[in-house]
Image (tube, rainbow, N blue to C red):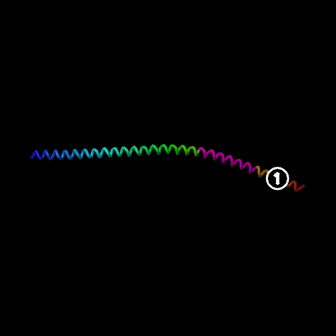
Amino acid sequence: VLREAKTSTENELNQLRLRNDALTSQLSMAQQALLNTANDKNNVISELRAELKMKSFELTTLGVSFEERMGQLRASELEVDVLRQEVSAHKSALQRLEHEAGQD
């Protein structure tokens, strides 16, 4: 009876060892898959950070360009206003001269 119990226990121990080995192997594969996934995600994050830096630089450059163009636009608008005033003054002078010429 003891011999049968010993044999049964040894068989059960062997089965448990095999199951433990299988579970250890599965755990190792799962850990490797998790590590690979984490590395992939880290690579994606690094790429996104680099892209974000580029976009930030582009945005800064566009902002500077926009401000320069807005300055040029304001200067052009001022120049247009000055020219309109000059045209208005010339029209007034022309009308005055025409009026004076008409009275002579």
Q: Nearer the viewer, residue 10 or 86?
A: 10
First to last magenta residue range: 64-85
**In the image, what residue occupies the spot 51% across and 43% down?**
53
Residue 2: x and y in percent read 10, 45
Q: Residue furthest right?
A: 104
Near mark 1 (Cα within 10 A), the count class, few <14, some 14-19 or many ≥20, is: few
Using residue 23 as the reference point, say whether residue 43 is left or right of it: right
Residue 78 within the magenta-colored segment of the rendering: yes
**In the image, what residue occupies the spot 35% across and 45% down?**
34
Q: Residue furthest left?
A: 1
Residue 8: x and y in percent read 15, 47
Residue that label 1 marks: 94
Q: Quadrant of the C terminus?
A: bottom right
| Secondary structure, magenta segment, majority class | helix
Q: Nearer the viewer, residue 34 or 72?
A: 34
Q: Amino acid at mark 1?
A: Leu
Residue 91: x and y in percent read 79, 53
Q: Nearer the viewer, residue 89 or 57?
A: 57
Using residue 1 as the reference point, say whether residue 13 is left or right of it: right
Q: Which picture quadrant has residue 31?
A: top left
Using residue 28 as the reference point, say whether residue 75 is left or right of it: right
**In the image, what residue occupies the spot 11% across and 47% down?**
4
**In the image, what residue occupies the spot 85% across and 54% down?**
98
Residue 25 within the magenta-colored segment of the rendering: no
Check disc 1 and report its element: helix, strand or loop.
helix
Using residue 1 as the reference point, say whether residue 46 is left or right of it: right
Residue 35: x and y in percent read 36, 43
